[in-house]
Amino acid sequence: AKPSFTATLDLESQGSKLDGFMKVFLKDDDVYLEMLGSKQKMPLEDDETTDMLPIDLDKFQNYKVDKKEIKPFLKKASISNDTLNLELDPDEMNKAIQKQSTDALPRDDTYKKFNVVATIKDDFLTKIVLDFEGTQKDATTSEDQKVVGTITIEFTDINTKKALIFPDLSQFTESES
């Protein structure tokens, strides 16, 4: 079956919050993106979409974390009841980021802290919190700017077989690649 999902992303920065900042819908091999009044439709296999959502959908559904892949990045790990805590090694994260850097897409991020807290219920991830600190080069001044962030991802209605509710997708315009 073709995978489908709906996602709503809220944005909070420096005490200001914008609910529904971005909405993403996947239906019939198309990605629909609604952000700041813009509504775009793009094929899932499109290069632009693939760069934005770097997920191999065939592998994603049955993906398991390979301990050999993650072990070099771990500084500390613990499990308590239904919570997994990971403290990642910022030096290893920075090396991996630099390997992905290209002339077209330079990666000027440097992490000083990167922690992951995952909540698991009935063998499913229900919440992931990414907590990070670092620096990023300002595109205009080339000076380092401090970056501090927390990204929270919550999954709801897992395996409930509830019908997904999509907006009127005919209002989304084809993205120009």
Image (cartoon, helix red, strand yellow):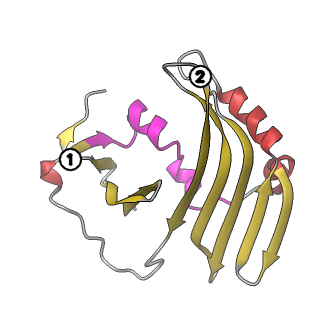
The crowd level at tag 1 (other Cα within 10 Å; few <14, some 14-19, many 20+) is few
Q: Is residue 64 left or right of residue 16?
A: right
Q: Nearer the viewer, residue 153 or 49?
A: 153
Looking at the image, tell me whether mark 1 or mark 2 is earlier in sequence order. Answer: 1
- Identify which residue is drawn at 40% across, 62% down: 1
User: Mark 2 falls on what kind of element?
Assistant: loop
Looking at this view, is 118 or 6 the one in front? Answer: 118
- Relative to 170, is 135 above or below? above
* Residue 106 tag number: 2
Task: Give above or below for 163 relative to 43.
Answer: below
Q: Which residues fall within the magenta stretch?
A: 41-64
Q: Amino acid at mark 2?
A: Pro
Can residue 79 be seen at all in this image of the molecule? yes
Q: Residues within 10 Å of mark 2 (few under 14, many from 20)?
A: few
- Of all residues, the one furthest to the front in this rendering is 15
Residue at 61% across / 20% down in the picture? 102
Residues at discs 1 and 2 in contact (Cβ within 8 Å): no
